[in-house]
Amino acid sequence: MNITEVRVKLTEAKKNRLQAFCSITIDNDFVVRDLKIIEGYKGAFVAMPSRKLADKCPKCNSKNHLRSRFCNDCGNKLDDKRALGESRDESKGKFKLYADTAHPINSKCRDEIEQKVLAAYKEEAEKAKEPGYKPPAMDIPDDIDYDEDNTNS
Ligand SMILES: [Zn+2]
């Protein structure tokens, strides 16, 4: 697999752990968007695109994020313990609230993506220090929770 292009859009708020959004192009043919660069305790790492896991409200059947305490539609109080069900990620001993929508299936590929994306991120962060810096045009998801612990990787 050849990563032929990486685009990085830095996030505005510097205090957040979420540092940037990225897209990668594979073999000039296929784009994966919404990768994230997150500042972890051991340095920056790349999080794969993911979706929030949801389940249905027992009262009105609307879908709610597993972390929601009340139904978004009818306001019904939801069971705090429901995330303990099948979505629990045993290996990490914590609730799995997200599922990756695209991800490498071996560590060689993971390393390659991580190296290229982090290199592009550092380059972009350097460029951003220069006067007249123009961030790249890139769509970013509009439903991002900056404070969530989205650290599946
Ligand atoms: Zn409901």
Image (cartoon, grey):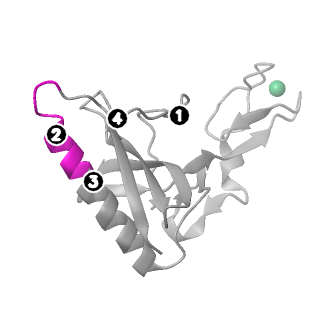
* Amino acid at circle 1: Pro
Q: Which mark is residue 127?
A: 2
Which residue position is annotated with label 3? 120
* Amino acid at circle 2: Lys
Badge 3 or badge 4: first in the primary sequence: 3
Badge 2 vs badge 4, beta-carbon distance below 8 Å: no
Q: Which element type, helix, strand or loop, lies under badge 2?
A: helix
Badge 3 or badge 2: first in the primary sequence: 3
Q: Position of residue 14 (x, y in %)?
A: 24, 31
Residue in view at x 28 percent, y 57 percent: 118
* Amino acid at circle 4: Pro
Give the CA distance from mark 1 to mark 2.
Answer: 23 Å
Residue 105 vs 18, above or below: the answer is below
Residue 71 vs 99, above or below: the answer is above
Q: What span is colored magenta in the figure?
A: 121-132
* Amino acid at circle 3: Ala
**Residue 141 shown left or right of residue 80 in the figure:** left
Which residue position is annotated with label 1? 141
**Residue 38 shown left or right of residue 102 in the figure:** left
Q: Position of residue 43 (x, y in %)?
A: 23, 56
Magenta-colored stretch includes residue 144? no
Residue 91 vs 32, above or below: the answer is below
